Amino acid sequence: MNKNISLLLGIFLGLIFIFLGILDNQTMDKTKTNVVALVNDHPILQSDLDLALKALSMNKDNSITPKQVKLVLDRLIDEQLLLQRGIELNLPQNSSPVRKIIVNSMIDSILSENNDFLIKKDDLLSFYNENLAFFLPSKELRLKKLFIKLGDPIIDEDRLDVVREMLINGDDFDKVASLKGDSFLPEIPDTYLPERKLLDYLDPILVKNAFNLKDGQITSEIETNDGYHFLYLVDSKKGEPLPFDEMKEKVKAEYIRRSDEDALINYLNWLRDRYNVVYGEKFNE
């Protein structure tokens, strides 16, 4: 079992290296002074060996012996043998885990290249102004609630009927709440509150319903574990734009996210033009 795990791990690591271009034959220095071994004409470079030895030396107090250097080189040769055999077995296509590693490595590589640039403040400021609606703070609600505590089902239904009738007839919401409702804590402040603050006073399901209301609208009763709730959206307002300097980090993160998304889409479109993609008959209808 351990041998199989080691085999698969070696192939995984090798595939990551090759698809990141680390083992790309076209870019390697194949001068004899830099090649420490050949595996089916594929060179293992002195720089590869130095990197592996550096990693080994971090975990050792004493200097590395020539025997250990040879052992490390043999492990690099083993890895190259496993890699070549994995490719020979078409493992990138036949193994789902290997495909995912390659795809994720490719995406990381594409996005890494895309982020290799300096983002100018003027570009971020223009992006902020062009997408101001996206960066506006969330809508704020001025909300009221009428609450009826859970009790005897028959009595509760009678109370609900009375409340429904009064609200349908246009009676003042505060008056109906005072006459027919039960007290509840904490009370909702009579001011504009964003979603995160409303959650301090209301069950999440009530907050969700509140944000689906139009100004002046009243819900029918909404049942929760503690009782029945009628919500009245007095009015609402959109958040005011914040100064750019206060939003800079959020703007930068969104700018990079959209840039990454565009870069990946463009790269995939380039690949579709470069390679032959044929859909099955049922997808060509």
Image (tube, helix red, strand yellow):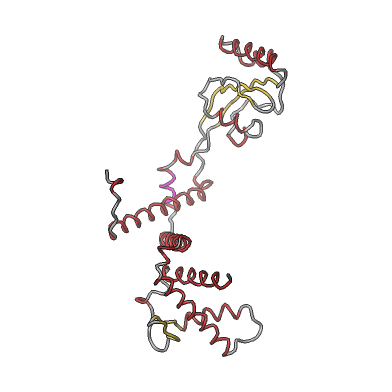
In the rendered structure, which segment of residues is drawn in magenta? 123-128
Outermost residue, bottom direction?
66
Residue under the image location 57 percent in, 19 percent down: 220
- Percent x, y of residue 95: 45, 63
- Percent x, y of residue 134: 46, 40
Frontmost residue, 253 versus 179: 179
- Percent x, y of residue 38: 42, 84
Above or below, 185 relative to 46 = above
Quadrant in which the N terminus is drawn: bottom right
Instruction: Give the prevailing secondary structure in the magenta stretch.
Output: helix
Outermost residue, front direction?
1
- Percent x, y of residue 264: 39, 55
Q: Is residue 185 left or right of residue 2?
A: right
Frontmost residue, 166 versus 79: 79
Residue under the image location 58 percent in, 71 percent down: 2
Q: Quadrant of residue 174?
A: top right
Frontmost residue, 15 versus 166: 15
Q: Is residue 218 magenta?
A: no
